[in-house]
Amino acid sequence: MKVIAENRRARFDFEILETVEAGIMLTGPEVKSCREGHVNLAGAYVSFHNGEAVLKNASISPYSFAARMPHEERRDRKMLLKAAELKKLTTRAEEKGFTVVPLSLRVGRFVKVELGIGRGRKKTDKRQHIREREVARKLKQTGDY
């Protein structure tokens, strides 16, 4: 499957503990727009209502050739999950400090979303993460690893 959109900020802001792949309910023009890569996951999140997972604030630009069937760019989209996965995600999301964020959007035969269960990082954790990344980069450049 080809990755067409990635939420790189999510991996920086959250410590991702577990990932789950889910389907997403889209209209025809939205799928075509996804295949063209007109998707932005920045600021998107998953919420749970009435036993359903809903992707909120994800931007899928309108497909230019679908004049008769335009869609709303930032509408709520239902996630397609198995019952056991949905139950696991809802219980983890209800725990203090955990959230479910979309990490990437993939297109193959179907459009899939990779969801991550994460714990928010504090500013000091982010600085430590940057420091570790820079040390690893320097070690790799000098060949002393």
Image (cartoon, helix red, strand yellow):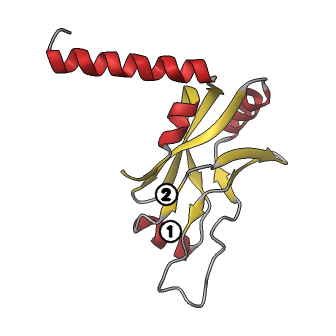
User: In the visual, does 103 lie left or right of 57?
Assistant: left
Question: Which residue shows up at 63% across the image and 50% down it?
Answer: 44
Crowd band around label 2 with a 10 angstrom C-alpha radius: few (<14), some (14–19), many (20+):
many
Q: How many other residues sit within 10 Å of disc 1, few (<14), some (14-19) or many (≥20)?
A: some
Mark 2: secondary structure:
strand
Residue 132 screen position, x and y as percent:
40, 16
Is residue 41 found left or right of 96 in the rendered image? left
Residue reaching furthest to the bottom: 68
The residue under the point 62% across, 49% down is 43
Label 1 sits on what residue type? Val
Q: In this view, does 84 lie above or below 74?
A: above
Q: Name the residue under label 2.
A: 111
Q: Position of residue 14 (x, y in %)?
A: 58, 30
> In the image, what residue occupies the spot 63% across and 76% down?
71
56 over 26 or under it: above or below: above
Of 123 and 60, the residue lying toward us: 123
Mark sitting on residue 31: 1
Q: Which amino acid does label 2 sit on?
A: Val
Q: Position of residue 41 (x, y in %)?
A: 55, 52
Quarter of the image with the C terminus in it: top left
Assess whether mark 2 and mark 1 are in contact (beta carbons under 8 angstroms).
yes
